[in-house]
């Protein structure tokens, strides 16, 4: 219990620090949202200044941070200068879309990487393992950006898949199943690409964890006792490797919001990625801070979940921390 | 007894027959009820029904006409609202809209507009002069800070709006103003019955956001809001009370629905158009035009190159008077920049044809004046279009006291090599290309130029705040063909007088002359006289080159073959300006 | 030992690659800024051995290119004139590593002939030459950033692992914060604040350095892990028992145990930072015109018309794959050796 409480307090402090430093960073970069307006000959500078003052952009940094913090603690994440509406509802929809994509891709990647990693660790050195190593190396060396661009080109040239977005136009009136099928159809390319990018790394880690477990003395002893290979693998080695695997799972959760950013931007998936990129470039500061905070929450949550699961599953850690 | 019964039956039958007609009549786009003074359009007759899909490069920020400033919001708002006097994008001249006629007082300071009778908002409520007065109150309110407010400030004082009677409104200007009737385009008339309480309660700035309920707004445009899905699309449906009809008496618009899809970039816009997901595309770049044009026949769409629009790209030098704040390096370089012969030499050395060919794939026009050939009413055709000449440039530099070292480097009278940087925004690929081409051109003169491409905000900060730059490549796109739209650029005290903004008094005699001419054309009502004045401004700019005009990109648009009445124009919004007359085959 | 063969294989591949790039001036037919305004987006020049009349030449040759009247923007071969390939030609001057000047190029064609083995970009500049010269900037960026990251990572990770306690807590929490912040803003700020007359490549290296300094978090955690277990080794405890100072323990006993991990990290980070350089260029923070880097070469792919019409612009990306393969294989081999040693 105390362990949990300690981690929780750490998490809160971390989030606070992230919020403060993000705010400070944002102030360093020159310009603000209304620069484009200043270049419009039909709007006077006085008007631009008045609009800036509406958003409090003329106040000094500490004052703005204080106001933002106060508002955030009440659940108000500020206003987006781009849409002139509250940030929270905007974030909710985008985060949901991002989680749909990254959740699907992560699940796919684990479904592929876990069995493949275990199998290649068990059959270490065999042809299958060598082919697997080659394949993962090959995929690892292709830069993510080029992979997604290639997928986009494939979609545009062949027309087999939609070239972007989450839904087709005019699908709004259809029933739930048609809409679900439509979304699934749009999900194929980005999720497949993302899963392809994530699987090699995961598979290598799984293989490494399993290999370490399989090499340990007690496994040799178990084999010596005559316990079958299958039983050894699943009943003895896998639990031993579970520590690393749980940390890996925690890492997957922690990066759930940020892994899909590149895929979303290239393939026009309406998630947090394009929102963040656009907000950074247009200096929509409250949106940027809110997205960064949300990502940090996930980061912290992922680590917390992993630590919690480790605490529950591994008695050594429980003892260490009592 | 029987006869009375028969008569009653016949009457009843007759009455039933008449009643049976009514549902059929009101369902179709047929004859309007008596009492509505509808505008009759002259375009070809289309047929009703269908949906148009259009891709927006970014999401609309707001649906509030008073606050909207970005292109996406304005595109959607244009479909939802109407104004008093329209600028017909095809002819570039004004035509009656909600105001069916207007009279101008002799001194040119009073405009009396007569509204059409019987017009209703999209929720069925009637339009009256009170709505007009209320709308302009919103635009002029200093607490709301509408970006359009400055357009209504003429001669230093805001326009006065007063209701004469329920169908007449009078606008009074502080001074006579040449383009006054063009002012009204873009000022949407808003419903007082829906928005007055928000205004009185001080919450108007939050009203009419993109996520509002459709019932919260009623407009006078051809469509009304149906649905908004965040991150995906906005759907508009036909406004049954729209006040225009075609020549056959069918009430416009023809389309049942318009869908605005949000795509993340111009490239995605092009991809989706090619795939047939969208029906209309505008603001196409030259490269995507080339890609799309290969598949025109196969994919059943057509592309149009409308020639140069109003955008002009130019190179300019830092002519700010920085005084002691300037670094000695910059102060020294400004001695070169301030010599008109230096600027003329640079202009003579630039290969504009190469810029057209390489930066715009041939889809642009070289320009030597800030008025582009697309602006037929105002361009001064007598401005010389001097071809590129390195020799002429060298002669100009020699006469300005420059010379060359043995290895070809250009040095000034003090013997220091001529080198400077050209600033540009990294997000605009064409301008970066233009800067790179200019760099190469000027190297033939022995100048050592390097291109600094900064992020947009950083560039604006240097141009307008710190004035810490040497030269820059930028572009401006006039809001309207009329010169009054550019007052702030050419007046020496203007905010967007880019090379030396906000001068307390004109820094050079020619800038003083431009000031005088611009002020005069503002109050001159006769077009021929104004043209002569503005021609003179163009000549002075072409001689003194505060901006070295380079190219004007062509306006490129396209539509699916099934879209009828498609008439793209070079004024924004290029393709949807006549959305009420578009139909689907 | 298999890992030995792997390691040598990777080292040879990397050495060849790096030699090609170091001597870019020699291997590149043209300079990186030479524009041919008549030939924007020309496809790769094809080498022929047999001419139009069926005669076989021993020396390969190329044809000139002229505009294709049927297809605006495309080119067809002009078979009227042959330009034989010449080796060890005298061409434009260049400097090897900025010191030795030379005019010798490996291949070239004479007269009006053009040798664009990887096609040209929008300004008519030879992509092969720009790839080789660009490698100098990009690899330098990768090495610099990786070295800085690992250096900072070693310092912080060693301190955290060695002293433990609140120093460890503080530094590890700090690393979590570092991982979460939007560093793009800092890069924008740094770029915007620099005076205009600093040379573009210096600006770029500064941005890369900032990027490297920011990236200390992950190496630090790895080093910390190694230091934690290293400081418990028997011989370290023995040395401590003999009265060795902290500094002595750190430098003589603990840090040497981290070298394996350090080199592995560097090998893994170099490709990642090369990719980060590409991303910076995509975002507009790349090295300025007319300099070439792999990022600026690839950033034109962001535009759809390039992606779909000019396939040769993809080639620099494909050529990166063997380079990354080399580094990852080297990292793999190093890791395997580490395992075998530490057991």
Image (cartoon, grey):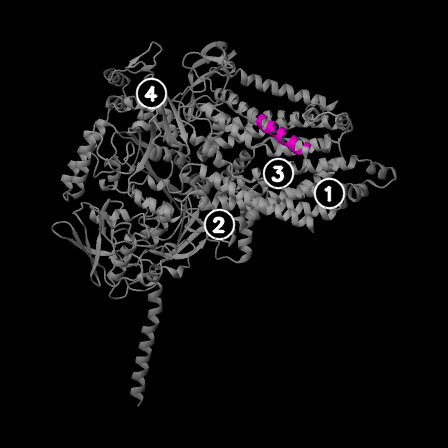
Task: Point out the tag, 1 or 2, that comes first from the N-terminus.
Answer: 2
Residues behind callouts 1 and 3 on a single chain = no
SS of the residue at dot 1? helix
Q: CA distance from mark 2 to mark 3?
A: 50 Å
Which residue is label 4 attached to? B442
The magenta region covers: C147-162
Label 1, label 3: how far apart the Cα atoms are: 28 Å
In front: label 2 or label 4: 4
Label 2 – label 4 distance at C-alpha: 50 Å
- Residue B571: x %, y % from top left: 29, 42
Do the CB atoms of the residues marked 3 and 4 lie less than 8 Å apart?
A: no
Residue A256 visible (yes or no): no
User: Looking at the rendering, in which quadrant would you find the N terminus of chain B?
Assistant: bottom left
Magenta residues, dominant SS class:
helix
**Is there one chain holding both mark 1 and mark 2?**
yes
Q: Label 3 lies in what chain?
A: C
Image label count: 4
Q: Is residue B551 above or below residue B158?
A: above
Residue C150 inside the magenta-drawn segment: yes
According to the image, label 1 marks what residue? Answer: A242
Residue B274 within the magenta-colored segment of the rendering: no
**Residue labelled with disc 3:** C170
Q: Is residue B312 above or below residue B584?
A: above
The residue that label 2 is drawn on is A168
Tell me the SS state at disc 3.
helix
Percent x, y for residue A319? 76, 45
Label 4 Cα crowd, 10 Å radius (few <14 / some 14-19 / many 20+)? many
Q: Nearer the viewer, residue A273 or B304?
A: A273
Nearest to the eye among marks 3 and 4: give it: 3
């Amino acid at each position: 219990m105390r362990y949990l409480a300690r981690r929780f307090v750490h998490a809160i402090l971390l989030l606070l620090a992230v919020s403060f430093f993000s705010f400070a960073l944002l102030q360093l970069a020159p310009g603000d949202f209304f620069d484009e307006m200043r270049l419009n000959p039909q709007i006077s500078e006085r008007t631009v200044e008045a609009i800036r003052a509406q958003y409090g952009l003329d106040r000094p940094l500490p004052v703005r941070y204080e106001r933002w913090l106060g508002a955030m603690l009440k659940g108000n994440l500020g206003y987006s200068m781009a849409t002139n509406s509250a940030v929270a509802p905007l974030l909710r929809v985008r985060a949901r879309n991002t989680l749909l994509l990254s959740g699907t891709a992560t699940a796919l990647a684990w479904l592929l990487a876990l069995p493949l990693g275990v199998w290649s660790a068990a059959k270490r050195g065999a042809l299958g393992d060598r082919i697997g190593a080659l394949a993962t190396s090959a995929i690892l060396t292709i830069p993510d950006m080029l992979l997604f661009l290639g997928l986009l080109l494939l979609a545009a040239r062949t027309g087999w898949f939609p070239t972007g977005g989450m839904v087709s136009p005019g699908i709004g009136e259809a029933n739930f199943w048609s809409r679900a099928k439509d979304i699934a159809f749009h999900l194929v390319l980005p999720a497949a690409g993302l899963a392809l990018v994530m699987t090699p790394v995961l598979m290598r880690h799984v293989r490494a964890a399993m290999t370490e477990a399989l090499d340990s003395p007690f496994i040799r002893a178990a084999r010596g006792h005559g316990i079958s290979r299958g039983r050894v693998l699943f009943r003895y080695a896998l639990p031993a490797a579970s520590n690393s695997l749980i940390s890996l799972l925690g890492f997957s959760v922690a990066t759930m919001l940020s892994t899909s950013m590149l895929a979303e931007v290239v393939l026009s998936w309406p998630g947090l990625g394009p929102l963040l990129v656009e907000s950074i470039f247009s200096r929509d500061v409250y949106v940027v801070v809110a997205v960064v905070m949300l990502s940090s929450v996930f980061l912290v949550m992922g680590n917390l979940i992993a630590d919690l699961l480790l605490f529950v599953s591994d008695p050594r850690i429980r003892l260490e921390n009592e | 007894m029987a006869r009375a019964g028969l008569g009653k039956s016949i009457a009843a039958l007759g009455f039933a027959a008449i009643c049976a007609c009514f549902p059929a009549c009101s369902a179709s786009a047929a004859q309007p009820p008596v009492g509505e003074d509808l505008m009759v359009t002259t375009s070809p007759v289309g047929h009703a029904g269908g949906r148009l899909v259009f891709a927006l490069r970014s999401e609309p920020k707001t649906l509030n006409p008073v606050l909207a400033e970005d292109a996406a919001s304005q595109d959607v708002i244009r479909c939802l609202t109407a104004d008093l006097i329209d600028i017909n994008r095809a002819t570039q001249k004004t035509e009656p809209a909600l105001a069916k006629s207007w009279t101008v007082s002799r001194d040119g300071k009073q405009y009396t507009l007569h509204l059409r009778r019987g017009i209703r908002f999209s929720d069925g409520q009637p339009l009256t002069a009170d709505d007009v007065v209320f709308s302009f109150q919103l635009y002029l309110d200093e607490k709301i800070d509408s970006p359009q407010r400055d357009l209504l400030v003429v001669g230093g004082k805001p326009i006065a709006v007063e209701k004469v009677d329920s169908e007449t409104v009078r606008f009074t200007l502080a001074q006579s103003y040449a383009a006054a009737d063009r002012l009204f385009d873009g000022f949407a008339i808003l419903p007082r019955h829906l928005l007055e309480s928000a205004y009185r309660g001080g919450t108007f700035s939050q009203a009419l956001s993109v996520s509002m309920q459709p019932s919260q707004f009623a407009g006078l445009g051809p469509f009304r809001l149906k649905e908004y899905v965040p991150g995906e699309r906005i759907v508009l449906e036909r406004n049954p009370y729209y006040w225009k009809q075609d020549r056959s008496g069918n009430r416009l618009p023809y389309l049942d629905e318009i869908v605005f899809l949000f795509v993340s970039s111009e490239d995605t816009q092009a991809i989706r158009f090619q795939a047939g997901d969208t029906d209309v595309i505008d603001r196409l770049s030259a490269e995507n035009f080339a890609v799309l044009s290969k598949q025109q026949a196969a994919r059943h769409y057509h592309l149009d190159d409308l020639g140069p629009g109003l955008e002009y790209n130019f190179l300019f030098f830092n002519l700010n008077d920085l005084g002691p704040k300037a670094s000695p390096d910059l102060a020294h370089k400004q001695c070169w920049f301030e010599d008109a012969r230096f600027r003329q030499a640079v202009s003579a050395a630039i290969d504009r044809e190469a810029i057209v060919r390489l930066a715009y794939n041939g889809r642009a026009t070289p320009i030597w004046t800030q008025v582009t050939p697309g602006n037929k009413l105002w361009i001064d055709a007598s401005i010389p279009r001097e071809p590129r000449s390195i020799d002429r440039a060298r002669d100009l530099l020699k006469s300005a006291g420059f010379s060359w070292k043995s290895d070809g480097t250009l040095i000034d009278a003090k013997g220091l090599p001529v080198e400077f940087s050209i600033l540009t925004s990294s997000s605009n690929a064409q301008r970066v290309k233009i800067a790179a081409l200019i760099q190469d051109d000027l190297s033939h003169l022995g100048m050592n130029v390097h291109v600094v491409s900064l992020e947009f905000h950083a560039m604006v900060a240097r141009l307008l705040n710190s004035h810490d730059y040497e030269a820059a490549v930028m572009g401006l796109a006039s809001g309207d063909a009329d010169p009054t739209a550019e007052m702030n650029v050419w007046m020496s005290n203007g905010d967007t007088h880019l090379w030396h903004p906000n001068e307390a008094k004109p820094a050079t005699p020619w800038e003083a002359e431009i000031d005088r001419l611009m002020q005069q054309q503002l109050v001159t009502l006769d077009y021929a006289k104004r043209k002569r004045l503005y021609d003179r401004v163009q000549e002075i700019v072409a001689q003194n080159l505060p901006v070295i005009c380079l190219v004007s990109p062509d306006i490129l648009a396209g539509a699916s073959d099934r879209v009828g009445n498609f008439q793209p124009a070079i004024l924004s919004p290029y393709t949807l300006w006549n959305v009420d007359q578009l139909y689907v085959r | 030992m298999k890992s030995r063969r792997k390691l040598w294989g990777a080292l040879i591949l990397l050495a060849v690659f790096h030699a090609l790039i170091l001597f870019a001036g020699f291997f590149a037919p043209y300079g990186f800024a030479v524009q041919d305004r008549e030939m924007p987006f020309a496809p790769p020049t094809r080498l022929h051995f047999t001419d139009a009349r069926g005669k076989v030449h021993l020396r390969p040759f190329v044809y000139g290119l002229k505009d294709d009247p049927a297809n605006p923007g495309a080119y067809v071969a002009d078979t009227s004139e042959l330009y034989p390939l010449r080796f060890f030609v005298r061409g434009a001057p260049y400097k090897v590593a900025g010191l030795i000047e030379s005019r010798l190029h490996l291949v070239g064609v004479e007269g009006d002939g053009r040798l664009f083995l990887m096609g040209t970009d929008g300004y008519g500049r030879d992509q092969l030459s720009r790839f080789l010269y660009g490698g100098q900037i990009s690899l330098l960026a990768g090495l610099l950033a990786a070295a800085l990251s690992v250096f900072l990572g070693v310092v912080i990770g060693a301190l955290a692992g060695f002293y433990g306690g609140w120093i460890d807590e503080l530094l590890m929490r700090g690393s979590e914060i570092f991982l979460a912040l939007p560093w793009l803003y800092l890069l924008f700020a740094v770029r915007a604040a620099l005076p205009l007359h600093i040379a573009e490549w210096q600006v770029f290296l500064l941005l890369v350095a900032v990027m490297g300094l920011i990236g200390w978090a992950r190496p630090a955690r790895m080093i910390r892990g190694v230091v934690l277990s290293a400081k418990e080794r028997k011989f370290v405890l023995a040395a401590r028992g003999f009265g060795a100072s902290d500094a002595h323990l750190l430098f003589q006993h603990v840090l040497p145990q981290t070298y394996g991990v350090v080199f592995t990290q560097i090998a893994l980070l170099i490709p990642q930072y090369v990719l980060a350089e590409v991303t910076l260029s995509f975002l507009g923070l790349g090295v300025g015109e007319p300099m070439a880097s792999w990022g600026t070469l690839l950033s034109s792919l962001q535009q759809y018309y390039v992606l779909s019409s000019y396939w040769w612009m993809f080639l620099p990306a494909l050529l990166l794959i063997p380079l990354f393969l080399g580094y990852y294989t080297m990292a793999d081999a190093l890791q395997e050796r580490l395992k075998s040693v530490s057991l």
